[in-house]
Image (spheres, rainbow, N blue to C red):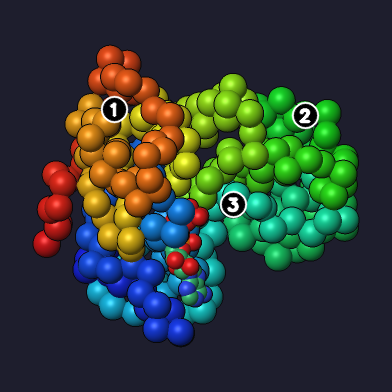
Amino acid sequence: MFRLHDVSLRHANGFVALREICLAVTAGEHIAIVGPSGAGKTTLLRLIAASLRPTGGHLDLFGTDPWALSAAELRRLRACIGVAHQAPPLPPRQRVVTAILAGRLGQWPWWKALVSLAYPVDIAGARAALARLDLGERVFDRCDRLSGGQLQRVGIARVLYQQAQLVLADEPVSALDPALALQTVRVLNSDARVRGATLVASLHAVDLALSCFPRIIGMRAGRVAFDLPVAEVDEALLRELYAAEGAFLPAFASDPASDPPPGDGGAPRRGTCWR
Ligand SMILES: Nc1ncnc2c1ncn2[C@@H]1O[C@H](COP(=O)(O)OP(=O)(O)OP(=O)(O)O)[C@@H](O)[C@H]1O
Ligand SMILES: [Mg+2]
């Protein structure tokens, strides 16, 4: 699905947000990225989404170098990627239904996209996506009349509606209560599983990552600190990952191996590079 080889990202001000990232992800994998604030999780997801260009190394996405493509080809490639944001960038006055249908704008012919902006062409489809997140009745609401958690779920419904081969979710449930967060991550997981899509999600809730994902990537200071099947992620590793946060360790399952999620993990071992 994608590979990063020695990828680094240096910002215009000289700050290096990612260093020597090596990752290989195959189609259908479900991966959680955890790590302290500022570790580079969002930067990594934006890089995989081909919205940030690496300043070093190489990204292979769907078997191609996205940055060698023409603008039109790059647009087509991005249409195969669904991105769920922590704060979905939805126009405040936009109706929920329009926001969700926009998930397929990149796949529709121009005339259908244009018609849909004036009048929603697939209200039933938008409602069905929302209903999976218990929001079916809000389909005609304006986005600025929703709470932060409801807005996050609208962003996820848009990704569900898009049916992308690769789903990248950046803190997609940070505004939800723990029960709803678990339910929502399960919807993302089951949707990706049924379609054979790849799911990569950054999560601050370590317990959620351990209970729902077979492969865990720990990031710290712009590097991959570990990349392991969930059964091999133990408390010591997590304490080390969050060491700079002082004594506080986000809650996580005491024995993640006791309730392993489906899938075999398939992760490269810690510190390995795919080259
Ligand atoms: N445009 C930018 N210019 C310079 N530095 C930046 C820029 N954008 C992000 N950074 C820095 O890059 C680092 C990684 O940021 P990133 O948003 O990827 O972290 P994160 O792991 O997602 O954090 P959080 O858990 O708080 O969301 C941070 O130190 C941040 O300050
Ligand atoms: Mg982030």
* The C terminus sits in image quarter: bottom left
Could you tell me residue 147's position as x and y percent?
A: 78, 40
Q: Name the amino acid type tagged 2.
A: Gly
Could you tell me residue 161's position as x and y percent?
A: 63, 42
Q: Name the amino acid type tagged 3.
A: His
**Sequence-first disc among 2 and 1:** 2
Q: Which residue is mark 2?
A: 136
**Sequence-first disc among 2 and 3:** 3
Tell me: 247 left or right of 154: left
Q: Is residue 128 above or below residue 1?
A: above
Which residue is at a point 63% across and 28% down the rendered structure image?
A: 177
Q: Which mark is residue 85?
A: 3
Return the residue found at the far front: 247
Could you tell me residue 253's position as x and y percent?
A: 37, 23
| Disc 1 residue crowd, few under 14, some 14–19, many 20+, Cα 10 Å | some
Which residue is at a point 14% across and 44% down the rendered structure image?
A: 269
| Disc 2 from disc 1: Cα separation | 31 Å
Q: Secondary structure at mark 1?
A: loop
Q: How many marks?
A: 3
Q: Nearer the viewer, mark 3 or mark 1?
A: 3
Q: Secondary structure at mark 3?
A: loop
**Sequence-first disc among 3 and 1:** 3
> Which sits in the foreground, 85 or 112?
85
Return the residue found at the far top: 258
| Disc 3 residue crowd, few under 14, some 14–19, many 20+, Cα 10 Å | many
Quarter where residue 61 is shown: bottom left
| Disc 2 residue crowd, few under 14, some 14–19, many 20+, Cα 10 Å | some
Q: Name the amino acid type tagged 1.
A: Gly
Q: Which residue is mark 1?
A: 263
| Disc 3 from disc 1: Cα separation | 25 Å
| Disc 2 from disc 3: Cα separation | 20 Å
